[in-house]
Image (cartoon, grey):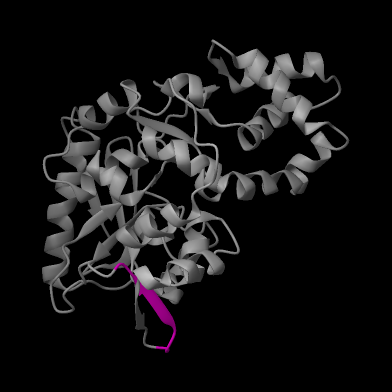
Amino acid sequence: MEAIEHLVAMQAQMPNGPYVGLWARLENFRHDDLTALIESRDVVHATMLRCTQHLACGEDFRWLWPTVAPAVRKALTDAYYATQIEGMDLDELARVSRQLLTGKTLTRRDLGQLLTDRFPGRAPGRLAEAIELLEALVHPPPHSTWGRWGHRRGTPVTLADEWLGRPLTDAPQPETMVLRYLAAFGPAGVMDIQAWSGSTRLRKVVEGLRPKLRAFRDEQGGELLDLPDAPLGEPDRPAPVRFLPAFDNAVLGYRDRTRVISEENRRRIAPRASGGVPLFLVDGFAEGSWTLTNGHLHIAPFRPLSESEKAAVRDEAARLLAFVAPDNTEPSFTLE
């Protein structure tokens, strides 16, 4: 719970991603540790930062959704949605959706079908997805709990306030969001905060908080901000090898991702997905990707690794396999 709170929200658009992300960060993490929090409604799975699916503590979601909702709703102007909702009264669409979901959980498919009964001639799937940009919905379990690797279930949706048993906050809290971001990701710049959150025009918010912050300069002279009492990493301290899930916060937490992955290596994975590739870190930097297929782990470094680096990668790979495929009697991995 503390780890999720520290990160504000964990990227969760890939099946099992948050489980691997927490495993990489915590000692003795077990699948049930997170599953229990989701089933108890202490942690929720929903669309929030950058219009993508994340896990957040329920109490944080109550203020985070109203804070990022204006940016999330702007996605409705994208052609993907616009062609299907053109000319619709979005307030009426939201009202009808809340009426359909009150007191129940529906799959996106069922919700979309019910909406087309009320708004004929529209694509049901597109309408159901649009509702998640208009209203605070969550995806209740078992959708967001540990499952067969890479398996996608149908997505259930329900009203967030009903699921949590309490209303969301009335007003956005951008100051809280900025301070919580810096506590997890600082030192960072304003553009980093905006890239992480998907929100814009945060410079004025940051300026209002400046008396509570301390400033640094990066190698290019750009300003980085942090909380006054936040610890700074020791520059010479070795960082252990870590396997990260696709879209992990460590990679997508900044606009300037060169602090985690070089521009050359980012371009290697960009044709597949920007950040949407599981990566492994060597001494704190992304130095390769990995995939898991039928219990076999394939590891593809971006550069030749030293013998000591290979040994560290193999050790961590064995730990990863024990976590993601605990029932596999013959786990194996290949290191290119």
- Picture quarter containing residue 324? top left
Is 304 situated left or right of 64 in this image? left
Q: Quadrant of the N terminus?
A: top left
The magenta stretch is 220-227
Residue 128, position as x, y percentages in the image: 67, 27
In the rendered structure, the answer to whether residue 94 lies left or right of residue 15 reads: right
Q: Which residue is pictured at 54% across the width and 37% down the height?
A: 170
Residue 129 against residue 217 in the figure, above or below: above
Q: Position of residue 210 (x, y in %)?
A: 42, 72
Residue 318 placement, left or right of 267: left
Residue 165 colored in magenta in the image: no
Viewer-side residue, 45 vs 143: 45
Residue 186 drawn at (x, y percent): 33, 67
Whole-percent x, y for residue 118 in the image: 80, 15
Q: How many marks?
A: 0
- Name the residue at 32% across, 28% down: 42
Who is closer to the viewer here, 1 or 140? 1
Q: Name the residue located 51 percent from the left edge and 69 percent from the top edge.
A: 191
In the figure, is residue 317 to the left or right of 89?
Answer: left
The answer to whether residue 224 is magenta is: yes
- Report whether residue 243 is seen: yes
Image: 61 above or below 97: below
Q: Residue 151's image quarter?
A: top left
Along the viewing direction, whichever of 313 and 79 lies nearer the viewer: 79
Classify the position of the C terminus by image quarter.
bottom left
Residue 53 shows in the view: no
